[in-house]
Structures are given as C-alpha cells and as structure tokens.
Amino acid sequence: MKKRVLIMSAGAGSGHIRAAEALEKSFKSDTRVEEVCNNDALKYTNKFFRDFYSKLYTSLVKSAPNFLGWWYKTSDEPWRTDRMRHMIDRLNTKPLVRFIRDFEPHITVCTHFMPAGIISHLIATKQLQARLSIVVTDFDFHAMWLSRSFHRYFVAIDETKAHLEMLGIPEERITVSGIPIDPVFQQAVNIEEERAKLGLNPDKPVLLLSAGAFGLGPTEFMVERLFNLNHDAQTLVVCGRNEELRQRLLGLTREHSAQFKILGYTDEMHKLMKVSNIFIGKPGGLASSEAIACGLPMCVVTPIPGQEERNSDHLLEEGIAVKCNDLTTLAFKLDRLLDDPPRLALMKANALRFSNPTASQTIVNTLLDDQLPPLAFTKKQRAAIALAAGPE
C-alpha cells in the first residue's frame, strides 16, 4: 500500500524548514508514496503564538544571544519543561490538530520539536494512527526533542546516537542519517564555468561570507575586517532576505568592487559553496551540513550560545573548521589558512568524510521499509531517562 506522508516543521529559524523541504523532495521522488504534505505547523496557530516561536526567537538571536544560551542549558533536562510546554502548545494548535487528523497520514516526520509534541500526544491518546519520526536538525540532541510516544529518531552523528542509547532509547530506534539537505548538493558543479558566471578570477581564492537567511549578525563589521586581508582573495557575501544590508554593503565595498560580490537571497547556495575555498558564517545545523557536503572548510563566527556552540565544537573536533572568537582577528585567521594549502586540503577531506549528503534519502528509505511498531514510554521509563541524563 502506498503511503501518505506528513512532514511538519516550524518557522523558528530557517534550518527546520530547509530540512523539511529536503525530505519533501526525496519522498516525492519515491514511487511507494501516494501523497506528501509538507507544512509549517505555525501556520495553523494564532498570531501571538506564531510570533512567540518565530519573531521572539529571531529577536533574541539578535539582541540577547546569551539568554538563549542560558535557556538552552537550563531546559536541557528530560521532561523538565514537558508538561507546561505541551499544554501551551495544545491550547494554541487546535486548527493544526484538525488538519493532522483530517490528512490521516501513515507516516509523520517532524523537523521541529513543537509539532512532534502535538503528534506524539495524538498518538498516545489514540486520536491518530500513524508513525512519528523525529529528525534532529543539529549535531547534538536537546531534551526538548524527547517525545513520550514516537517511532524513530534520526540524528546527525554517532556520538548523538550513543547519548540517546545511554538515556535508555532502544538502539534500533535511532538511525544516524545525517541532517537532511537538499539533494541538489549532491550534483556536480563545473567550478570554472560557475566562477566565470560570477565574474570571479579563476586564479584567486574565493571566500564565502553568509549572513544567513535573514541577514542578521555583524556582517558589515566582518566585511570591513576583510579589507585587511594580505591575500588577494575574492569574497562572495550572501545577505539573505535583508535587502537593506545588501544596499549598505554595496556602498561599503564600492571602492573594493573587484574583491567583493554582494548577493541577495539565492537558491544556488550549492554552487556558491562549491566554487569557494572557505566558508565564513554561523554553524547552524543545516548550513554546516551543506558546507561539509561540498567539502568546504569553515571559519566559524558568532555562534548562538547553545546549539550552535555545540555544532562548532564538533566541527572543530573533526578538523573541519577554525573559530574566530574576536572578529578583529578575522583577516588574520583567514590569512593563516590561505598560507597553508596542505591544511586546507586536509580540512576539505575531513569535511567530506564527516558529511552525509544523502541523509534525506536515508530517512525516506528507512521509514518506507520500517516495520517497527510505535513506542510509548511509561512513567517509570521517563523517570529512568531523566536519571540517566545526569545531575542537574
């Protein structure tokens, strides 16, 4: 029997949405699937709740990142915020519940913990007959991703699987898939041809500076620091959807137009990454996974305390990235890398070894072939998981 697949994300940051879009493409290309529906769960909630999840998060990233780091650590305890959080979610997601029940999926896949909690509750209370799988979109696992009823977890790395096993989640319920990225990142790119399209000199190194999907962060300051590079490098600056930032940078780099290409939002990040020598940006789960799939060494800047700092730790440990703690030294850090081609080559090899560009297809194949029944944790098992997580 062909399957109806429901993919749910939440627009709190762009990574959850991009992971869901990658899964949608892979599910739609499989003949075993009858219908695929990919939705942002926040579209089925009221404005206050949407703003709480999306605009508040973006505002805190910009103005109070240390608070996010504190909250990440404080809430990273199994079930600590579970009851209150899910009660608030259910009070504000009645249209979402109706949509899910009307669609009657066979398989549900969540790339954000909020819809996963809603679907888990529907399964536990026998309001929905479906399998719930959860795709973690960072390298590490936060306690908010825990669900009382679920089918399977998909995680980025072996270390995260080991963590979940030690918590008490059965080994056969955890698949190390990598973080799902658009299948387009698997496509070969003619580097010389793409550099020519961008007006780049084929003989000079290319840096790729990303301001993220929303164009946040101290991008102008970083561009000013790049004026101090000793190497005659070319820099692609991607401003995302922030047109004001793009216009300011065009003015800032007017006298350096041969060294800087200022770009707005693009759906060709895979090409930009493959023509570049070093990626400069925040270590979000999706951005990092895309970069390493392209074998692109990273210079990590301004990671959000919490999940991005942990992502950064893994990239540094694997020899894929360097980290610039003070943006005043950005040019110095990059010059050192460009002075050391063997090191850059090793970082590229490490990135390709660490990457899982076929993660979305791995998830699709696993779920369509899977015969495991749903799993529900008892109160005693939840207590054991909390105890296994260690002291507060």
Image (spheres, rainbow, N blue to C red):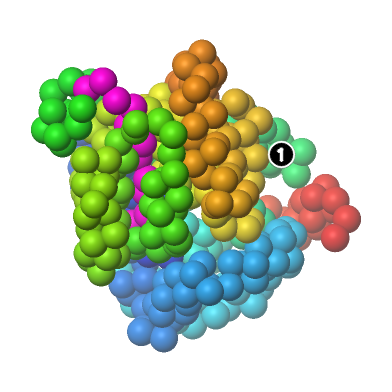
Pinpoint residue 90: horizontal percent, then vertical percent.
49, 77
Q: Is residue 130 in view?
A: no
**Which residue has dot 1 on it?**
163
- Disc 1 marks a residue whose amino acid type is His
Question: Residue 247 vs residue 180: left or right?
Answer: left
Residue shown at the point (57%, 58%) measured from the top left: 304
Pinpoint residue 35: horizontal percent, then vertical percent.
21, 47
Outermost top residue: 342
Mark 1 crowdedness (10 Å alpha carbons): few <14, some 14-19, many ≥20: some
Q: Which image quadrant is residue 369 in?
A: top left
- In this rendered view, identify the residue nearer to me: 226 or 46: 226
- In this rendered view, identify the residue nearer to me: 121 or 88: 88
Residue shown at the point (63%, 58%) measured from the top left: 305
- Which segment did they paint magenta? 202-213
Residue shown at the point (42%, 75%) measured from the top left: 55
Q: Which image quadrant is residue 333 in?
A: top right
Question: Is 104 located above or below residue 160 in the figure?
Answer: below
